[in-house]
Image (cartoon, grey):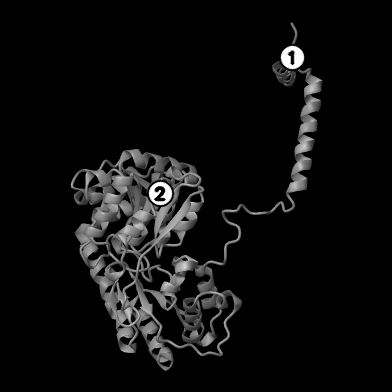
Amino acid sequence: MIVTSNCCLRRTFFALTTNCPPRSLAKQQTLSIRRRALSCSMTRSDPFKPAARVAGQRQDVWTIVNEAAAAAPEHLQPVVNMGQGFFGYNPPDFVLDAAKSALDRVECNQYSPTKGRPRLKKALADAYSPFYGRKLDPEKEITITTGANEGMLSAFMAFIEKDDEVIVFEPFFDQYVSNIEMPGGKVVYVPMHPPLQGAMKTTSAAEWSIDMKELESAITPKTRMIVLNTPHNPIGKVFSKAELQAIGDLCVKHQIIILSDEVYDTLYYVPFTRIATLSPEIAKLTMTVGSGGKNFYATGWRVGWLIGPEHLIKYVSAAHTRICYSSVSPLQEATAIGFEEAEKHDFWNKSKKEMQGKMKKFNTIWDELGLPYSDPEGGYFVLVNMAKVQLPEDYVFPDIVADRPRDFKLCWYLIKELGVAAIPPTEFFTPENAHIVEDWLRFAVCKNDDILESAQDRLRKGLKQYIK
């Protein structure tokens, strides 16, 4: 009996399949490896060169604003943060209690099923089925994601390949762009046109409009998807039923997938229509994005979901599995209980009324100062036009702001001289269309009343002398 090692067997097998003796094969492989290594050393001058998808990006607006706020003069600290859209207060007690209780349960501290905890999917199906006029299947038509943003990335990863085109309305949430480009997609921008009188008087967010002919002309054979956001960030526009029907009809005509970002779907102050509910033909093409963080004042929880037909959702689930496998278990459980208990506490109505009250309360400062704004129909952001604000001509701005549009300078000045942080909305536009909003700033009102009052006081004292 002849005993042969596994190593020898492998060499013999490779030799037989390549018609080369084992030692000759080993020599050839060694030479090949050396040649590849030499080639790599000659072509890779920088071993730490980043991938093109993340290289060459300018410093993002969130970092600029946060660093500027941290470095503001001591007498302005703490800076009043009206910039980023995180809440200044906790979720309601019944949701917090659910989270604390979930932490005591063994199964809630372990992996959840990759498509989400059954209790949360059922709670979402129960909550959203009335809007759809039919019973949603929690197992086939809903998938849970690590926040709405990862959910959208999963949708793009599921359906977008290199050179596929995705239409995005401008202004846009900045994460859309990087998420589309990650799988090799190309963003095609269609601008939303501002109110003609927006710089002179307060107007409704509804007056920001889309030219449907302009939209259709942007569609090509490569168009795979359209991204919709309603209620809209940063405008606060709630798309009308007629607008949604026109967009939906175009998507049906050209067989384009609709990714409808509806994370502010409980904060609307005018009638709100969900595009997926308009017709079976539109529903067949639509994936709707939701957010537990936005619904329950818990943006740090990172619990999101997508609702849509099985033939779309199953591939989003597959992409989500490969991106992060599953999402945070105890917070999924708490979000489920939040939906189960919300109606008992009349939470949705109270939440909407409270946020609209904050919006009206804060916007009185613009009426007082004579600065026009775009009156929001939903969400918790307001765009304010500051064309009347004339900054000192001799004011020195750092390089990181000096080469950017005027709204960045306005933002910097408000932080450094007034101690109030806002967000420059040109960050949500392409360079070609940034001029549309270079005189505007975005303020988030999802803060405690004392914060809103502090911001008003600082704006009142600090801006009057610069308004012409």
Q: Which residue is mark 1?
A: 4
* Picture quarter with the C terminus: bottom left
Please name the amino acid that badge 2 sits on: Thr
Please name the amino acid that badge 1 sits on: Thr
Task: Pinpoint residue 49: horizontal percent, then vertical percent.
Answer: 67, 54
Viewer-side residue, 90 vs 116: 116
Instruction: Give the residue furthest to the top.
Output: 1
Which residue is located at x 73 percent, y 49 percent?
A: 44
Task: Pinpoint residue 153: horizontal percent, then vertical percent.
Answer: 45, 50
Q: If you read the primary sequence from the N terminus, does the residue marked by circle 2 or circle 1 appear first?
A: 1
Real-space CA distance between mark 2 and mark 1, rounded to the nearest whole angstrom: 62 Å
Instruction: Describe residue 384's horizontal placement relative to residue 133 as left or right.
Output: right
* Picture quarter with the N terminus: top right
- Secondary structure found at label 1: loop
Instruction: Describe residue 404's horizontal placement relative to residue 279 as left or right.
Output: right
Viewer-side residue, 243 vs 116: 243
Q: Is residue 48 above or below residue 231?
A: above
Task: Pinpoint residue 156: horizontal percent, then vertical percent.
Answer: 44, 48
- Residue 113 is at least partly visible in this image: no
- Secondary structure found at label 2: loop
Q: Is residue 392 above or below residue 71?
A: below
Instruction: Locate residue 441: give its quadrant.
Output: bottom left
The label shown at residue 220 is 2
Which residue is located at x 79 percent, y 36 percent?
A: 34
Viewer-side residue, 240 vs 349: 240
Q: Is residue 375 above or below residue 454?
A: above
Which residue is located at x 79 percent, y 31 percent?
A: 30
